[in-house]
Amino acid sequence: MPLKTLIIDDEPLARQVIREFLHAFPHAEIIAECENGRQAVAAINQHKPDLVFLDVQMPVLTGFEVLERIDCLPAIIFSTAYDEFAIRAFEVNAVDYLLKPYDRQRFATAVQRAIARRTVASAELERMLRLLQHAQKPEAAPERLLVRSGERIVPVEMKDIEWLEAADDYTIIHAGSAKPLSNLGLGELEKRLQPSHFKRVHRSAIINVTRLKHLEKDGEGGMLATMMSGEKVKISRRYAASFREGIV
């Protein structure tokens, strides 16, 4: 991937040195050169470079004034004859601070730091994109669960499940007369359920609201859910509030 590079310095010889030293980095593509701060602002905003070699003391605007006026923040390597600005340079998150005159080795170290920072930033951006894509495209909830029952593995249709009950590290699946025992705990099993249908009602219970017959107060601030089968499931005070919000 090309490293779009901008050279900003009011001294022609300084720009020439940077050009020559950049020959050691074939993927560094020099997209523009500027000799004053006003040109620098325009070039950065137009080209959106990956890397900028920036002098501090220049006509019109200083290097720091340039940074105050740009729309994006590329990797900045200060290249200057003034050492008193080094601390301020790193306060604005500069990659490096080259004090003139510098040799090829010192120059190469600065560029390698810029490349390393770019690599880390790209990896982080890629990670965030994957997370966003995963959030935008959630996996569809399965229509059935495969549950071990004795020596057999039996399918249980999601639509037939009335509620799920924690049993130590296992989960009892209440689906009519069938009550298979899942090897998964309630919390892990909850991740596989469709959130619009299955609601946590207690630390040890989840109900299928499409199989709910009616609700009633339990006299303790919670509620009782009566399911289609007639089974009653306690809704704790903590979870009852969300049900009350849906009452019209």
Image: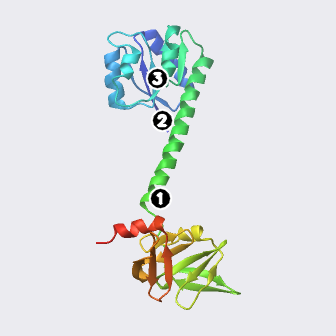
- In primary-sequence order, the first of circles 1 and 2 is 2
User: Who's the residue at 53% across and 86% down the image?
Assistant: 175
Q: Amino acid at mark 2?
A: Pro
Q: Which residue is mark 3?
A: 92
Which quadrant, please, contains the C terminus?
bottom left
Q: Residue furthest left?
A: 248
Question: What distance separates the C-alpha of mark 1 from that of mark 2?
Answer: 29 Å
User: Who's the residue at 38% across and 10% down the image?
Assistant: 58
Circle 3: element type: loop
Residue 2 circle label: 2
Question: What distance separates the C-alpha of mark 3 from that of mark 2?
Answer: 25 Å
Q: Amino acid at mark 1?
A: His
- In primary-sequence order, the first of circles 1 and 3 is 3
Question: What distance separates the C-alpha of mark 1 from that of mark 3?
Answer: 34 Å
**Residue 180 appears in which quarter of the rendering?**
bottom right
User: Who's the residue at 55% across and 77% down the image?
Assistant: 164
Circle 2: element type: loop
The one nearer the camera, 92 or 230, is 230
- In primary-sequence order, the first of circles 3 and 2 is 2
Q: Residue 76's x, y, as percent?
A: 47, 24
Specify few, some or many for label 3: CA neighbours under 10 Å numbering under 14, 14-19, or 20 or more: few
The one nearer the camera, 87 or 28, is 87
Locate residue 92 relative to residue 156 in the image: left or right. left
Q: Which residue is mark 1?
A: 134
